[in-house]
Amino acid sequence: MKKNTRIFSILLAMLFLFNLTAFAQEVPAYSVEGFETVDADNNRITTGRDATSKTAIASASKYEVSQVGAEILSKGGNAVDAAVAMGFAQAVAEPFTNGPGGGGLAVIHTAEGENIFVDFREIAPKAATLDLYIDAEGKSNGKTMTGGLASGIPGDVAGLLFMLENYGSGDLSRQEIMEPAIRIATEGLYVSTYAANAITDAYDKATTFPAMQKVYWDENGLPLEQGVILKNPDFAKTLALIADKGKDGFYKGEVAQAIVDSLAMYEGVMTLEDLAGYEATAKEPVSGTYRGYTLLSSPPPSSGGTILIEILNILENFDVSALKVNSPEYIHLFVETFKLAYADRAQYMADEAFADVPIDGLTNKEYAKKRSEMLDLAKAQSFTFDDPTLFEHVDTTHFSVADAAGNCVAITKTINYYFGSGVMVDGYGFMMNNEMDDFSTNPESVNKVEPGKKPLSSMSPTVVLDPEGKPFLVLGTPGGARIFASIAQIISRVIDHKIPLHDAISVPKIWNNGPANNFQYETPLKGYEDYAITQETVDALTAMGHDKIGTAASGAVQAIEFLEDGTLYGTADPRQDGKAVGVE
Ligand code: GLU
C-alpha cells in the first residue's frame, strides 16, 4: 500500500513535470517575425534591439512602430513625417501608455539648425477647480487619479498634426501618414508579455470602468493574454475620422461629444468648448551644455529639461569619469545631485503661464557650482531649495527618429498612468488620461490645480549636439519624475565613461524621489550583472548615511546616436518591446 502510494506520487510528479515542460514549449514567447522580447526563462532579451543605417533610423518601444517609421522614411518622408506616423501608430500599439486621450512633448532639431519644442501637454478644463480634488480636511480625494475629473484636455492629436503641418516634408498626405496606424488598429497586433502584464494589472480598473473590457478583455470575460491578437475597430474609426477631417475630426463633432459624455458618466467637467479650444504650441527648447556638448530639451510645462540641465551642471563640477559606474561613490554623487535638483523642482517648476519659473537661474553654471559646494562626498544629506533668481539674466512612451541630413525628432507621449483615468471613450476605442494627477492638491504649491493650467510634467525628449554643433544623441524615456534622472545617467555614461549607447541604457539605473534622503536602484538585466548594485554597495551607502534604499524598475529609453563616420545607430530599451529599424 505504502509502496503503491509512493509510485503514484512519483507518477503524479512526472506528469506534473511533463505538463510544465509541455506548457513551456506550447506558449511561445512574444514574437513578431522572429523578434522575441523574453527568453524561455522569462528574462528580458537585451540583444538584437539595435540597428544602423546610412540614411535614416527610427526607434520606438514597439518594434512594429519602428517599422512604421522606417516605412514612412522609405517613402521619402522626413524625420517629422515619420515621427508623426509613429505617434499615431504607437497610440494603437501601446494604448495603455499613450494616445489621443493624452498629450506629449517633442523636441525637433532640423538639418538647417533650427531647434523647436512642441508642447501638446494636457490642460486643466475650465471648470476643474482645486476644491473638486480635495476633501473637507483639504486632503487629496483621489479624483486626480481615476474617473472623469482626472483628465486634462488632451493634446495628442493637435500636437501630432501641428508637427506634420509645420515641420513635415509636405510630400505625404495626412491619410498616408495615418494609414499604418489605421491598418494596425484594423488588423490587430500581438499582445506582448509586457502588454499582457499591464492588461492583467488593470483588472480592477476595467471592473470599475467596464467600457475598457470591450477592448482589453476576451469573450470569456478575462484580460487578454500574451500572444493573442488585439484588434480595435472603434479606434480605427476614430483615426479614420482624424485622417479625413484633421484636428476638427477629434476636437469637434462626434468624437468630442463622446469624450465629454464618457467623462461625464464619472463626474467629468470637460466641455465641448474646452476641447474645441485646444491648440498645440511651439517655442524654443531649454538649452544648456555638458562638457562641451549642447543639450536641447523640454522647458515648462515640463520640469524635465530644466532639471536635467541643472543635474548635469552640478555633475560637471566633479570628475565623474574617475568613478566606477554604480560604485558606492558614483551612486552617492548622483543621488546627492538628484536631491539638490529635486528640491528646486518642487519649489519652482510649474506652467509658466501661471508662475514665474527662474529657468535661467536653474540652468546657470554658477548656480550649479554653488549647489555642488553643498554636496558632501562622504555623507548623505537632505536638501532644500536655493535661490536661483540671483543667477537669472534676463521641462509614457518615447520614440526617436533621425535622418542622415541631420533632422532629429524626440517625442515623449503619455496618458500618465497605465490606462490613464480608466475612462475609455466608449465606441471610439481610446483611453482618457489622468494627467490631473501631475498637479499638486496643496494650495501652497506653485503647481497647484488651476483651471486652464498645464500640470507639471517630467517628460524630457532631448537632443544632444556635439561640441561642433552637429547632432550626437536623440533620446528620451517614460518614467514620471524619474525621467530626467534617467536621461542624465545615460548622457553621463556615454560622455564620461564612453559606454556604448545600448549598454548605457541597459546598465541598472538609480533614482531618488525628491529632496529627501532616499533612493531606489534597478536590479540588473541578464548580461549586465557586472554593473549590479550589490549588497556590499548598499551597505557602503548605508554607512554614508543613505536611508530608505529600495529596488524599483522604471523607464524605457529609445535613443539614436550619430556615429563619427556618419552612420546612424539606433537602439531600444530591452525593458520593453522595442527595436530600432534602419532604412536601407
Ligand atoms: N505624466 C508624466 C509626466 O508628464 C509621465 C508619465 C510616465 O512617464 O509614465 O511627467
Image (cartoon, rainbow, N blue to C red):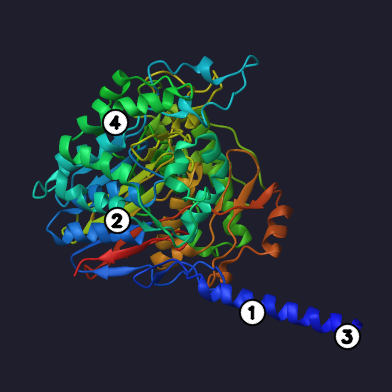
Whether 248 is drawn above or below 516: the answer is above
Q: Are marks 2 and 3 in contact (CB under 8 Å)?
A: no
Q: Secondary structure at mark 2?
A: helix
- Give the spatial CA distance, label 1 vs label 2: 36 Å
Q: Is residue 302 left or right of residue 109?
A: right
Q: Residue furthest front?
A: 1
Residue where numbered disc 1 is placed: 18
**Disc 1 C-beta below 8 A from ligand 1:** no
Dot 4 amino acid type? Val
Residue 190 picture location, percent across and down: 39, 60
Give the mark nearest the N terminus, 1 or 2: 1
Marks 3/1: CA–CA distance:
22 Å
Give the mark nearest the N terminus, 2 or 3. 3
Amino acid found under the numbered disc labelled 3: Lys
Question: Of the numbered discs in the image, which one, if any, rests on residue 255?
Answer: 4
Residue 310 placement (x, y as % from top left):
44, 42
Q: Mark 2 or mark 3, which is nearer to you? A: 3
Q: How many marks can you see?
A: 4
Labels 3 & 1 near each other (Cβ < 8 A): no
Q: Amino acid at mark 1?
A: Phe
> How far across and how far down the image is residue 257, in percent?
31, 25
What residue did someone put label 3 on? 3
Label 4 to label 3, Cα distance in Å? 70 Å
Q: Secondary structure at mark 3?
A: helix
Mark 4 or mark 1, which has the lower sequence index?
A: 1
- Residue 387 position, x and y percent, is 49, 28
Real-space Cα separation, disc 4 to disc 1, in angstroms: 52 Å
Q: Residue at x 53, y 76 (%)?
A: 25
How crowded pointer 4 is (Cα within 10 Å; few <14, some 14-19, many 20+) is rated as: many
Disc number lying in front (4 or 3):
3
Residue under label 2 = 187
Q: Which element is circle 1 on?
A: helix
